[in-house]
Image (cartoon, grey):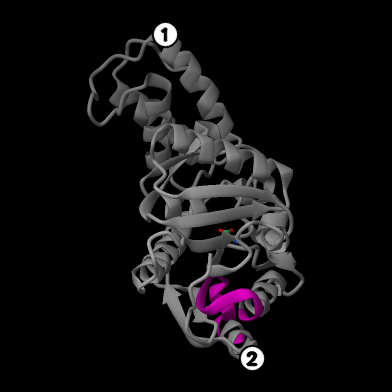
Amino acid sequence: MSFPPDGPLAAAVEHVAAELRAAGVPSPDVDARWLVAAASGVDPRRAPDRPLTRATAQSLDELVARRVAREPLQLVLGTTAFRDLELVCRPGVFVPRPETEVLAGLAIGLARAARADGRPDDVPVVVHEPCCGTGAVGLAVASEVDGVVVLIGDRSDAAVALATENRDRLLRAGRLRSRVDVHAGDLLDPFRTSAHPDADVLVANPPYLPLADLDALEPEVVVHDPHDALAGGPDGHEVVDVLLEDAARTLVPGGAVVLEIDARRVEAVVAVARGAGLVDVAVHRDLTGAERFVMARRPGRPTAHG
Ligand code: GLN
């Protein structure tokens, strides 16, 4: 379907929204506004009467066709907002979700608390983030906390390349207050041989869905997100369990772990964390009220380390 040029942007938004609704897109009005803004370079709410040019109508056509085919909005736009950062998104790498902004906020609180805990200025707080995907969580930490070294890693080459690109863009834009190193490898493996093998904070949004759940997901997710980033295995929580066991062994004494988890698995996760020897095990909710995050500590008091 084409959009008649010269019509006002507001009419184009309504037109696009109707088309998206007919295609079963879950949030047609919001997505229509984003697509018109991307095609025109103007927020249609600010300039509803501005006419759609011929060139804008053409690029809008292309963007709408992709969204109608249920490509995620973030991949169609090529970027997503994450806390106050803009991150590049690309096919083949898990698209960051709003609930994960809360995970990043919890990690930021832990990193700041470690920073404030009487440590000398020249001893960095070390944050490890395996399963980093676009790099969203670790980059948010480095953009909001000073005096931290953030190691992010992923076993997917596409994720490592994209996280590096996002890190470099933010660095060039002056948005990072702390250093971020990107590593290739599975879970904590690449960090062990790095210059900062001991973490004060371990944060991750690992794959945590049971494999059988994949069939029931929206096309945006099941067709476009890597299944490796969604499902942890038949049970779902295989990776979460490994990370909790690792946290109990590899965090500095007093160090903290915070993970995004499946809200249906909260009791089992708390039991695994306690069984691994972690203390102060707490569950935090996402913005919809679901119990989405587990936080815990390795027992002991931190000692100065570099
Ligand atoms: N939160 C994902 C989803 O929305 C599930 C897997 C994950 O984030 N680790 O589908």
Residue in the picture at 69% in, 70% down: 239
| Residue 288, picture quadrant | bottom left
Residue 143, x across and y down, in percent: 40, 49
Q: Tell which of 18 and 220 is nearer to you.
A: 220
Residue in the picture at 44% in, 50% down: 178
Give the class, few, some or many, for how many residues have Cα within 10 Å of label 1's Cα (few <14, many ≥20): few
**Counting residues from the N terminus, which is met first, the one under dot 1 or under dot 2?**
1
Residue in the picture at 47% in, 84% down: 301
Which residue matches tag 1? 54
Above or below for 88 versus 145: above
Which residue matches tag 2? 275
Q: Circle 1 sits in a helix, a strand or a loop, which is it?
A: helix
> Which region is colored magenta?
248-268
Residue 89, x across and y down, in percent: 55, 39
| Label 1 CB less than 8 angstroms from ligand 1 | no
Q: Disc 1 residue type? A: Arg
- Is 264 a magenta residue? yes
Above or below for 106 versus 278: above
Distance from disc 1 to disc 2, alpha carbons, whole Å, reads: 63 Å
| Residue 194, picture quadrant | bottom right
* In this rendering, position of residue 161 left or right of residue 15: right
Q: Circle 2 sits in a helix, a strand or a loop, which is it?
A: helix
Residue 242, x across and y down, in percent: 70, 74
Q: Tell which of 211 and 206 is nearer to you.
A: 206
Residue 286, x across and y down, in percent: 42, 68
* In this rendering, position of residue 225 left or right of residue 83: right
